[in-house]
Amino acid sequence: MERYEVRVSRVLLLFLILIGAIFFYVGMDYLFLHTFLNWENTPESKVLRALFIFFFVGCGGLIVLNEGYYFIRPPLIMSISREGVSFGTGLRYRPFLIPLAYLESVDFVPSRSVTLHFRKSEEIPSSKATSMGVMYFNYGLSVIRPYIDRPPEEIAMRVRSFIQPAVLSANI
């Protein structure tokens, strides 16, 4: 069975890992080395210091761990098969499936996004809370360019190959 998948871009994940690593470094530097941040330690600033360290070390470390895991196994933003179109929802890219029979058309803006348009029906939701890089609103699914690992032109072409057979079989 043919299936086409679009995953989160590893370039974006590397950028997010770098940001997390910078946060982590700044927190660890302030905790141990004081080369980058050499603030005075007064009794009044101990709570602020602890909050600063907790935020930078904790958030930076979590960003590096989460995005590092995603770098090893990038989450699925969208996939299309004969079964239907699946896209990431929620914080952890949980797949939500819309049957292929509802897919009407696809269009793209070369440097921005790809949008799949679905037939309006009470059987599918008109909008859904989605993951980063995906928007599903008013029966339209958009995947945004910086988040995807493939060019929008390729995605649109592959999605069209799924639409054509569905339209032909519906007309027979």
Image: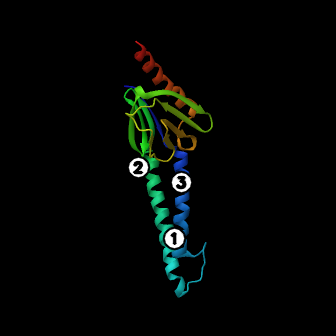
Mark pair 2, 3: CA separation: 16 Å
Q: Quadrant of the N terminus?
A: top left
Give the residue pinned by disc 2.
92
Residue 21 location in percent, x, y?
Answer: 53, 60
Which mark lies nearer to you, 1 or 3?
A: 3
Q: Nearer the viewer, residue 12 or 72?
A: 12
Task: Residue 11 in the image: state x and y as whole percent.
Answer: 55, 46
- State the CA–CA distance, disc 1 to disc 2: 28 Å
Q: Residue furthest front?
A: 122
Name the residue: 51% across, 75% down: 31
Residue 44 position in % (x across, y down)? 53, 86
Name the kind of residue labelled 3 in the image: Leu
Mark 2 crowd level (few <14, some 14–19, many ≥20, 10 Å Cα): few
Q: Is residue 53 left or right of residue 83?
A: right
The way the protein has been coloured in the rendering is rainbow
For this rendering, which residue is in front, 51 or 97?
97
Image position, residue 136 (x, y; %): 48, 40
Query: Which three-letter amino acid code belongs to the residue tagged 1?
Result: Met
Vertically, is 70 above or below 60? above
Name which residue type carries label 2: Arg
Element class at badge 3:
helix
In the picture of the structure, the residue carrying the numbered disc 1 is: 28
Determine whether, in the image, residue 154 is placed left or right of residue 81: right
Q: Residues within 10 Å of mark 3 (few under 14, many from 20)?
A: some
- 85 or 21: nearer the viewer: 85
Q: Residues within 10 Å of mark 1 (few under 14, many from 20)?
A: some
The residue under the point 47% across, 35% down is 139
Earlier in the chain: of badge 1 and badge 2, it is 1
